[in-house]
Amino acid sequence: MSNRKIKYFTTGEFAKLCKVNKQTLIYYDQIGLLSPAMKDEKDYRYYSIAQYDFFSVIELLKAVGMSLKEIQTYMANKSPHHFLQLMQQQKEVVEKKRQELRMIESMIDVKIRSTEEALHLDFDSITIQHLPEEVLYLSKNIEDSSEEQFVEAVSDFIDELYRSQLDTGHPIGAITKRDQILAGNYDNYSFLYMEQPFPREGHSYFKTIEGEVIIGYHVGTVSTIEQTYERLFAFMEEQHYRLGQYVYEEYVYDAFIKNDEEEYVTKIMLEVEKES
């Protein structure tokens, strides 16, 4: 053992080299995944520098999502051919994760941009804006649904956005038809939606109509939203507009930004047409 310092590392030294705790190495030894290069008469473990690359591959495979059991299965049948095949498979996994991270980064950018814009909004204002055509991804029809059906529809829509990678980071909004709005049924939504700035082939989308939109903001819960609609209707009449086919609602501030529901902010967009 006189040359131990040249060729071998103690468990503590090797753990420090690998940036893990000693218990990780001991556990790997116990399950037969990475055993020390040698043990002395006192059963002390010693590792060689060559085992560092072996450990690095284990950590690499763990980092891309392989379980220790899956790594053990590979180790039981390892060969240059199997290793090459494994690395190619994991490269595909990494590329998929990279795509997911790009999507997450894009979603974060949208959240940052929309929140920065909200900081400069006057929530008491009502404006008329000319909006371009926008592409939306819709849920199934939820008009006249019960509370239980509505909750289920929201859950299904979120699942679909995730499965189809259609979550763009924009808020989930709700579309209400003109007839329901005029009847005062402001929460009888027809569809949920999410804006799709970059539509992908293979999906069915809904396109909004390019044109004039009256935009206002409701601060508070849905129980008082009628008051905001009354303000919007009064403004619409003053400006000699009539209500178009759809009304769109989406949160500006919700539970992620405000603790008190009374401080939630809903953006309301009314499609309108100029009275002749």
Image (spheres, rainbow, N blue to C red):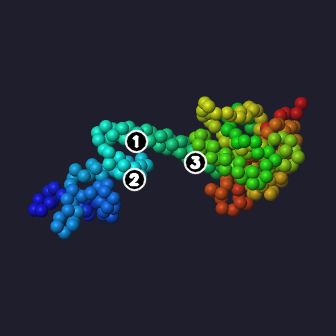
Q: Eyeballing the image, is 257 above or below 114?
A: below
Q: Quadrant of the N terminus?
A: bottom left
- Judging from the image, what secondary structure is the residue with disc 1 in? helix
Mark 1 touches mark 3? (CB < 8 Å): no
Q: Amino acid at mark 2?
A: Lys
Label 3 sits on residue: 112
**Left or right: where 195 falls relative to 233:** left
* Amino acid type, callout 3: Ile
Residue lying furthest left in this view? 2
Occupied quadrant, residue 169: top right
Circles 3 and 2: CB atoms closer than 8 Å: no
Task: Say which residue label 1 marks.
Answer: 90
Q: Which quarter of the rendered picture does the C terminus lie within?
A: top right
Which residue is nearer to you in this view: 32 or 225? 32
Using the numbered discs, state the Cα–Cα distance from disc 2 to disc 1 in whole angstroms.
Answer: 16 Å
Q: What is the x, y in percent for residue 201?
A: 60, 30
Query: What kind of residue is marked 1?
Result: Gln
Name the residue located 38 percent from the left edge and 37 percent from the top edge. 88
The first of marks 3 and 2 along the sequence is 2
